[in-house]
Image (cartoon, rainbow, N blue to C red):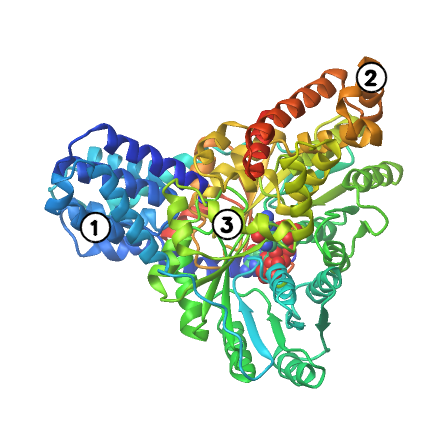
Amino acid sequence: MKNLFNTLEKLKNKLVKTKDNLLGRLNILLKGKTKLDDTVLEEIREILYLSDIGYDITELIIQKLKENIKVNLEFKYEEVINLVKHELLLILEKGERHNSCFDYNNFKILDENRPKIIVIVGVNGTGKTTSLGKIAYNFKENNYHVLIAAADTFRAAANEQLTVWAKRASVEIIENKNTKDPGAIVYEALDKAIKNHLDVVLIDTAGRLHTKTDLMNELNKIIRIIEKKLNKKPDEIFLVIDATTGQNAVVQIENFLKYIPLTGLILTKMDGTAKGGVIFQIVDKFKIPVKFIGIGEGIEDLQPFDSNEFINAIFEN
Amino acid sequence: MFEELTLKLESAFKKIRGQGKLTEKNISDALREVRRILIDADVNYKVAKDFIEKVEKKSLGKEVIASITPGQLIIKIINDELIDLLGGTTSPLIISNTPPSIYLLAGLQGSGKTTFAAKFALYLKKTGMKPLLVACDIYRPAAVEQLKQLGKQIDVDVFYIDKKPEEIASESIRFAKSNGFNAVIIDTAGRLHIDEEMMSEISRIKEIVRPTESYFVVDSMIGQDAVNTAKAFHDKINYDGIVLTKLDGDTRGGCALSIRAVVNKPIKFVSLGEKLDSIEVFHPDRMASRILGKGDIVTLVEKAQNAFDEKEAKKLEEKLKSNRFDFEDFRDQLKIVKRLGSVSQILSLIPGLSSIQKNVQIDEKAFVKVEAIINSMTKEERRNPRILNASRKRRIARGSGTSIQEVNRLVKQFEEMQKMIKKLNNMDFKKAFRNFNLKIN
Ligand SMILES: Nc1nc2c(ncn2[C@@H]2O[C@H](COP(=O)(O)OP(=O)(O)OP(=O)(O)O)[C@@H](O)[C@H]2O)c(=O)[nH]1
Ligand SMILES: Nc1nc2c(ncn2[C@@H]2O[C@H](COP(=O)(O)OP(=O)(O)OP(=O)(O)O)[C@@H](O)[C@H]2O)c(=O)[nH]1
Ligand SMILES: [Mg+2]
Ligand SMILES: [Mg+2]
C-alpha cells in the first residue's frame, strides 16, 4: 500500500493522545511510588475504570497484581506495567483467529473463491458507512473489483452519503433509489458480482439498536439471502463499535450474535480521547477479534488491528 | 430508559429490605453494590464514588438506623440525591423575546445532532412556531442532503448556501428575519473536542449567531469519556443545555449523571428513536424515580394524551361505557398505540414492568399480525364478533397469512378484554389494553 507509511505515522500520532489519557497515566502514577499499597491499588483501579475496561477485568487485574506483587512491599515499576500489559494482551489474544481469507495488512484476498462478501452492521451512528468507504478504497487500491451495496434504505440520505464514498474510492455502487427493500439491493448486488466476476461486495446496512427485534430480524434475513444465493456464509460480518461507547457495547454484541454470525469488530473514532477499553471485555467474553480501528474521517484513516501494537502504543513512552 | 440500571438497583434494594435492621456495615455493603451498579451503568467512576459517599453520609444518620423502614429511607435518600444530581426541576425551553429564537446544536460525530434538529423543529412547529432548519455541516458526505430530506418529511424549510459554516449561519438569521421564521435551528458537523480547528469553528459560529440556547447533543451509550467531552465542549461554547439521544435502546445511560456532575447545565431533551416525533422533555424527578424502579407513569400519560385526539377519546369513552367496544374500535386503538411509539418503549414506562419486560420478548410483529387479522375481517364481523364461526375464521386466517389458532386466540383475548371493560365502569381503558398487550406475547 502506497500510503502505509503515512498511515502508520498518523496512527502513532493519534494514539499518543490515547496514551496520555489512558495507561500512560499509570507511568506517571507509578514512577514516584515504591510500595504497592491500597492507595496505589485504588489509583490503578480508577485509571482502569476510567478507560471503560469494566468491572470484571479491572478487578481481575487488581487481583493479579495483588497475587504477584506483595502488597505493602517494594515493587519495581516495570513489574506492574508488564503485568497489566500481559493480562490485557492475553485477553486480546483470545480474539485472534487465523481462518480469514483476507490479509488486511496488505488488503489481499488469499484464495480464489469469488465474490467475497463483507457485511457491515452496528447500532446507529457508529461509523459503518465511513468504515465501509475506507475498506472499499483499500481493496480498490490493490486493483480488486469492488461493488458497494447500499442496503441502508432507511436513514435519510444514507444512499447519497454512500454514493459519495463510492466516488471517493472509485468503485461501483448499487443504489437504493427505487426500492426500500434492503434484501432486494443485496440480491441485485450479488447478481451483478457473479455475472461480472467481481472480487468483493461490501454491504452497508442501516444503523439499528440491538433491542429492536424487527430490525434484527431484517438483518438476519439479509444474511440468509446471501447464504442462499452463494451457498456460503458472508466472508465477513463486521460489527462497528464507537470507541466512546461504554458498557452497552457488550450487550450490543451479545444481541447481534443472537441474530447473525459476526466475524469481527471495527473500533471507530479512536482519534478521540475515548479509550475503546470496552473491547477488552468484548474480546474476552465473545472471542471475537477486532479487525480494524478507525482513526479519523478521511478515507485513509483506517488501520488493521494488531493486539501487540495496540497495547504497545498505549504503553509507549 | 435506564432499564438495566433500574433492574439492578431494584435488586440491591431488595437486599437491603431483606435484612430488616440496618447497621453501618450493611449500609456500606449495600452501597458498594450500588456503586458497582452505577459503574456498570457507565456513571463516571469518580462521580459514582462521590455520589455514594454523599448517600452514605446521609444514611449513617441516626434517623436511618433507628427507622423501622431503613431500606425505604435509604432509597429515598438515593432518590433525592439522584434528582438533585440530575438537575432538580425540569428546565424550561427558553424562547427569545425578539424573534427569531436561535438554537445551536453541537456534539461528537454520530451523536444524533441532525436527527435531533429535525425532531426539535417538529416539536417547535407543534407548539405553533415557524422553525427554520440550517445546514452548517459542510464536511460529512450528504449531511446537507440528510437535513433537507428530514426537513421535507416534517414540512420545515431548510436553509443552505454553498459557503463556510460561519457564513451559512449568519445569513440564515438574516433570511429567517426577513421571511417570518421565529425559530432557527442550526445543525453543525460532528467534531472531536480535541480538534482545535473544529472547536474554534463552533465557537465562532456561536459568537456570530448569539443563540438563544445552545445544546450539547450526546449519545446516551457513551462511557466514561462523557465527562471529558462534555467538559471540553462546555469550556469552548458554554452550552445552555444537554440533549440525550438513543435512549430507546437499553443503555443504562449513566452518562446523564456524569455530565450533570461535571457541567452545571440542565438536560433539556431526550431523543428516543429514529422517528421524528420521538422526542421528550427531560424530567429529572421522573428519571430518578425511573432509575429506582418506580416507572414513569407521568410520561406515559402525557404521551397518551398527545396521541389521543379529543374527539376520538370522547367517542371511545362512550363506547366503553355502553359496552359497545368492538373490533373496529380495537383497530383504532392499535393505530394509537403505534402513534405512541414502539410497544417496548411504552411498556418500559409502566411501573413494575421494567423487570417483566426483560423476560418478555416484545415482538412488535405480534401487533402487525393482530392488525392483519382484524383487517381481514369484514366490517360486519368487526362490528359483531359473535358471528365469527369456523368457516369465517378460516377465511380470515387465510386472508391475513396467519393460522386459525392465531385467529382463535385473538378472538378469545378480545372477549376477555370486553369482559374486563365491562368490569371497569369508569375510564380505565388504558389499563385493560395494557394487560391485553402483554398477553399477546
Ligand atoms: N473522528 C472520527 N469520526 C468518524 C470515524 N468514523 C466515522 N466517523 C464519523 O462519524 C459519523 C457517523 O459515521 P457514519 O459512517 O455515517 O456512521 P453509520 O454507522 O453509517 O451511521 P448510521 O448509518 O446513521 O447508523 C460521521 O460524522 C463520520 O464522519 C472515525 O474513525 N473517527
Ligand atoms: N435509535 C435511535 N437512533 C437515533 C436517535 N437519534 C439519532 N439516531 C440515529 O443515529 C444515527 C446518527 O444520527 P445523526 O442525526 O446523523 O447524527 P449526527 O450527530 O448528525 O452525525 P454527524 O453529523 O455525522 O456528526 C442515525 O442513524 C440516526 O437515525 C435516537 O434517539 N434513537
Ligand atoms: Mg450508515
Ligand atoms: Mg449530522
The image's mark for residue B299 is 3
Q: Name the residue under label 2.
A: B394
Q: Which of marks 2 and 1 is nearer the N terminus?
A: 1
Choose between A213 and B381: the one closer to the eye. Answer: B381
Position of residue A270 measured from the top left corner of the image (x, y, whole percent)? 50, 55
Q: Quadrant of residue B258?
A: bottom left
Which structural element holds mark 1?
helix
Q: What residue type is labelled 2?
A: Arg
Gap between marks 1 and 3 measured at Cα? 31 Å
Q: Which amino acid does label 3 sit on?
A: Thr
Choose between B66 and B6: the one closer to the eye. Answer: B66
Position of residue B128 measured from the top left corner of the image (x, y, whole percent)? 64, 69
Left or right placement of residue A27 versus residue A220 in this view:
left
Q: Mark 1 points at which residue?
A: B53
Gap between marks 2 and 1 measured at Cα? 65 Å
Does ligand 2 reach within 8 Å of label 1's beta carbon? no
